[in-house]
Amino acid sequence: MEKRISIVIPNFNKAETVGKCLEAALNSDYGNFEVIVVDDHSSDASVEVISRFPCRLIQLQKRSGTSRARNTGAKNSTGEIIFFTDSDCLLQRDTLSIVNTLFSELDPQTVVGGTYTQIPYDKTFYSTFQSLFAHYFETKNTDNPDYIAAHAMIMTADVFAKSGGFPETFLPIIEDVELSHRLRASGCRLVMCPRIQVEHIFNFSLAGSLRNAVRKTEYWTMYSLKNRDLFADSGCASKELKINVASFSLSALLITGWLISLKPLFPFLLASNILFNAGVNRRLFRAFYDAKGWLFACLAAVYYALVYPAPVGLGTIKGFIKHLARQSGTGLSVPAPSTGPEGERDTC
């Protein structure tokens, strides 16, 4: 029996990608579904693009943020199951069929997550790195993951209604992490299904990749400090990534000490630190190799170990500063919804 599935897609200034998103969703091999797009007061041609497709379009009268857009779409849905995704994500043709089968077998209180395809829509180095990075860490713990990402978050309409929805007066990102934690606290089981995949359109350059790392880490740090789980092994905020950043920082200190003292102990400690970090992250490096071969794996490992930790560290520092400002009462206001080049939400 085909349960009715409502695909809910928030959109803000994604005219370049929302058409591809809708084309992929409407090309499903599943029969009983609807597509609801909530446009968050876009200033580009998004509404014109969306209007070309046989979906339901809801237009918010002012910029309200991704959480309100998702909540509005869910409240206006008619499906037994709600599938949240983003307007730069492409569903696979069999995705909804997989979802229907799962919800015929699982407890209705289960919240199911999907992940990115290993190779994204745009196959540049930085986009492929990000897609493989997220795919690996999001599928590392399939049973009871720490959170379900909103690029593929699925639950029954009843569970969503009882949850209270995505937080609308919160940080401009990480809203899916907060909802996941609230759902688990209410008794729901979180499950990651690697067969449910969406093909993401990143369009990442080096600058875009670094900017995304800074901003994502900044708000993740703020939330984790408040939630007191800064060192938790949490999806893309994994223990491997945290060790990688710590190793990068230690390497910088060891190189500085070596240059100052010229003592032979420092090269030994530096080599030991690098080998330890490589051992901790060996499965990620193997995922790079399995997907794209030796050349990509080597370049991706170098980028991950020697470049990526810098923006993650910067984001962590900014998050600490903003958290302390909030604690002292000088930064208690909720940041306005992002109108930057990254669109309505950032990416793992």
Image: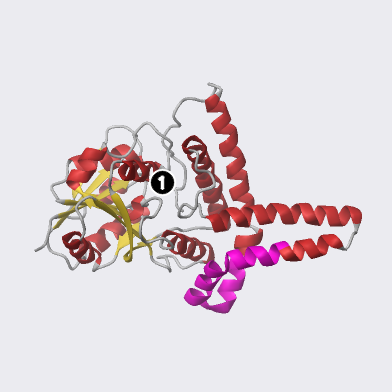
Per the picture, the main secondary structure of the magenta-coloured stretch is: helix
Q: Disc 1 marks which amino acid?
A: Arg
Query: Vertically, is 283 above or below 329?
Result: below
Q: Nearer the viewer, residue 90 or 252?
A: 252
291 left or right, relative to 161: right
Q: Residue at x 24, y 47 (%)?
A: 37
Q: Position of residue 132 (x, y in %)?
A: 47, 65
In magenta stretch: residue 340: no
Figure colour scheme: secondary structure
What residue occupies the far left of the structure in this picture? 1
Q: Residue at x 50, y 52 (%)?
A: 237
Q: Position of residue 72 (x, y in %)?
A: 24, 39
How many dots with numbers?
1
The secondary structure type at the circle numbered 1 is: loop
Q: Nearer the viewer, residue 260 or 75?
A: 260
Q: Position of residue 339 (x, y in %)?
A: 43, 39
Q: Nearer the viewer, residue 233 or 35?
A: 233
Q: Residue at x 89, y 52 (%)?
A: 260
Which segment is the magenta one?
Answer: 273-302
Q: Quadrant of residue 241?
A: bottom right
Q: Nearer the viewer, residue 347 or 233?
A: 233
Instruction: Estimate how packed mark 1 is, as few (under 14), some (14 to 19) or many (20 or more) residues with alpha carbons within 10 Å.
Output: many
Quarter placement of the N terminus: bottom left
Residue for badge 1: 345
Query: Vertically, is 222 above or below 205?
Result: above
What residue occupies the far top of the structure in this picture? 329
Q: Is residue 25 visible?
A: yes
